[in-house]
Image: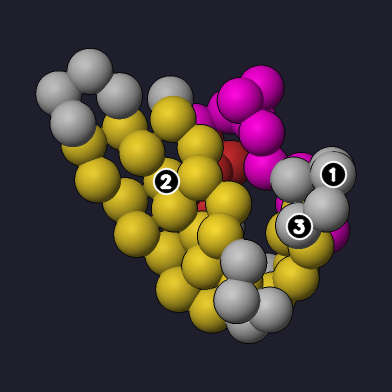
Amino acid sequence: MIRLNQDTPSEVLQEVKKGDMVTDTFSKTGLVEQIDISDDGLYRIYTFHLVTGRTIEIKK
């Protein structure tokens, strides 16, 4: 299981793939269904959509 939070290195965030088990260490845990990566000019935003319908968003 991969822990996703603000302290997770960018290299680890980029290696997460569909089907990986992830958690935000609080209430969101599940398999990754879809990954969106965007850049707002200041931060790179990683959005992980889980099969449970929940979303984990990390700004780095």
Q: Secondary structure at mark 1?
A: loop
| Residue 60 against residue 33 in the figure, above or below | above
Who's the residue at 24% across and 45% down the image?
Answer: 38
**Magenta-highlighted residues:** 1-10
Helix, strand or loop: magenta stretch: loop
> From mark 3 to mark 1, how far is it between C-alphas?
6 Å
Side of 37 relative to 60 (left or right): left
Task: Please say if the residues under marks 3 and 1 sit with CB atoms less than 8 Å apart.
Answer: yes
Side of 54 relative to 21 (left or right): left
- Please give the residue where the numbered disc 1 appears in the rendered image: 26
Q: Is residue 44 magenta?
A: no
Counting from the top left corner in percent of width and height, residue 55 is at 56, 60
- Please give the residue where the numbered disc 2 appears in the rendered image: 46
**Residue type pointed to by label 1:** Phe
Q: Secondary structure at mark 3?
A: loop
- Number of the front mark, 1 or 2: 1
| Disc 1 crowd, CA 10 A, few/some/many (<14, 14-19, 20+) | few
Q: Which mark is residue 28?
A: 3
Quarter of the picture holding the N terminus:
bottom right
The answer to which quarter of the image holds residue 39 is: top left
**Residue type pointed to by label 3:** Lys
> From mark 3 to mark 2, how far is it between C-alphas?
15 Å
Quarter of the picture holding the C terminus:
top left
